[in-house]
Image: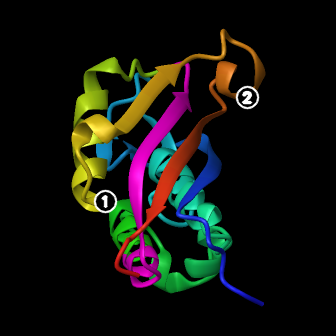
Amino acid sequence: MTESKCTFRIGNGYDMHRLVPGRPLILGGVKLNHPEGLGLDGHSDADVLTHAIMDAILGSLSLGDIGKFFPPDDPKWKDANSLILLEQVMQIIEKKGWQVQNIDSVIVAERPKLKPYIDLMKEKISKEIGININDVGVKATTNEKLGAEGREEGICCHAVVLMKKNEHQ
């Protein structure tokens, strides 16, 4: 099988975690305060924004998903900081000769209001990936009280990335 001659690739990522008491609420590496004291349940820190971005990056290169690299049954990843996992994903794609060009994402949550946190999320993600903060799109919306997100049972995130093959590769 020959390697793809594409110089650009896109990837799509999605993640959702249940809201539960007794867990921190972390999105894009930022700790938020939920009005009911809820956080996201998961093996790692359950950061749906960072997880969706990682899945989009890995998917763009047909490498699978984050569960392949950070299995939820591996105690090594228990309560792991997802920005550290993102750093490892970046090392994987850089070794393959690719770089992220831009990211667009949308977080779906009824509460808390995310607007005050978005710039800090963008800053943390852009720093970890090594791209300009203006190349990281983070948006927030509600589900208008519909579905699991609308009932505040969970928070989800959709992400898309554009990747470029390094010219010297």
Q: Secondary structure at mark 2?
A: helix
Which amino acid lies under the numbered mark 2 shown in the image of this protein? Ala
Q: Position of residue 119 (x, y in %)?
A: 24, 30
> Which residue is rendered at x = 45% and y = 25% of the image?
139
Q: Is residue 25 above or below residue 93?
A: above
Residue picked out by circle 2: 148
| Image side of residue 23 versus residue 59, left or right | left
105 vs 74, nearest the viewer: 105
Task: State which region is magenta.
Answer: 91-110
Q: Residue at x 25, y 59 (%)?
A: 130
Q: Any magenta on residue 94?
A: yes
* Mark 1 Cα shell of 10 Å, populated few (<14), some (14-19), many (≥20): many
Image quarter of the C terminus? bottom left
Cα distance in 3D space between marks 2 and 1? 30 Å
Query: Front-most of 94 and 49?
Result: 94
Which residue type carries mark 1?
A: Ile
